[in-house]
Image: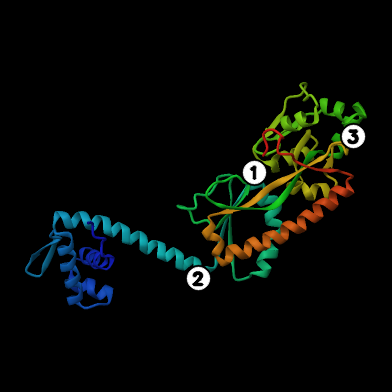
Amino acid sequence: MPINPNLNSLAYFEAVARTGRVSLAAAELGVSTAAVSQQLKQLEEQWGVRLFRRDNRRLTLTIDGEMLFQTTTTAFRMIRGARSTVLRQHNSRQLNIRSSPSFAVRWLTPRLKNFLDGNPEWGVRVDATPDFSNFETEIVDLDLRYGSGTWEKVHSECVITDFVFPMCSPEYREKLRNISDKPELQLSQARLIHSVKALYQWDIWFLVHGIAPPSQQAPLRFDRSSMAIQLARDGAGVVLDSLTLAQDDLERGTLVPLSEAFDVVEFPAYWVVCPARHMTRRPVRLFTDWLRKEGTKFDQSARSLLDTLNCTIRPTRDEEPGLL
């Protein structure tokens, strides 16, 4: 029957092998030399091998001892490094967040001061990247992810519902209205701007609305919604994108709905994602609670804005292709 390693004995062994002397190891560990010698003896007896050659007062590693030392010194170095990281994070009260880039820039950052004002002792690091966190190998407390919420083996909670519809600059809408007073014909002459990583794409939208997509103009494709929205604001075409990311432009009037005849699509889109064990951490709970409140305030303001713009909201249906 295998015997589990005695971690205390391994720590004593590693210190002796690294410092080269029992006395130095004892001083480092804060114990007597006799205690160190006893632990080494017990380790050799337990493993049934000699770890050191003893020549007078000198200790030299045997082949078996050298092999064990290479493993233990690496392991204890990693443990000491992890301990330093944990203590540093605890003392600095650091919250590490990863977020979808456009969401981080357009929604999270403008509101983050509210969280910091209420929690001035906390530092926050935001890593804006489309890459999903590997919580087992990276120091990340939580992800703010855009998606359908179908991730496995993690806790996921929707904090923001999205509202998606075709939008463009007022000047571009007027240009299309000069072509026709029918929204479907306006779209047939429009240049479409694609946010290629968005859940709700133009092909789904045309299929659901029973409208043939335009074929006369080459589409514009961007992997960041912030870029696609900027181009629409500049009058380059019509973008099918998110009120969550375009709220400021819609409130200022630099972007407008293409037509009130087209419903606004509503669906859960932005999620807190992390291992379930992270939800027991106080900073994660605090930040998630704050996100829920901010999400509720945003939802109320978004619905009020859409009402002002005379837009009708339609929740997505499960049978809609390619979305849920």
Q: CA distance from mark 3 to mark 1?
A: 35 Å
**Which amino acid type is shown beneath numbered disc 1?**
Ser
Residue 22 drawn at (x, y percent): 18, 71
Q: Is residue 244 above or below residue 60?
A: above
Q: CA distance from mark 3 to mark 2?
A: 57 Å
Marking on residue 148: 1
The residue indicated by pointer 3 is 174
Colour mode of the rendering: rainbow
The answer, for residue 252, to whether it is visible in the render is no
Q: Residue at x 88, y 46 (%)?
A: 309
Front disc: 3 or 2? 2
Q: Secondary structure at mark 2?
A: helix
**Which amino acid type is shown beneath numbered disc 2?**
Asn
The residue indicated by pointer 2 is 91
Q: Secondary structure at mark 1?
A: loop
**Which amino acid type is shown beneath numbered disc 3?**
Glu
- Viewer-proximal residue, 22 or 208? 208
Question: Quadrant where the C terminus lies?
Answer: top right
Q: Is residue 3 above or below residue 253?
A: below
Please tell me how crowded label 1 is: few (under 14), some (14-19), or many (20+) other residues with Cα within 10 Å. some
Q: Quadrant of residue 36?
A: bottom left
- Viewer-proximal residue, 166 or 227? 166
Q: Is residue 66 left or right of residue 192?
A: left
Please tell me how crowded label 2 is: few (under 14), some (14-19), or many (20+) other residues with Cα within 10 Å. few
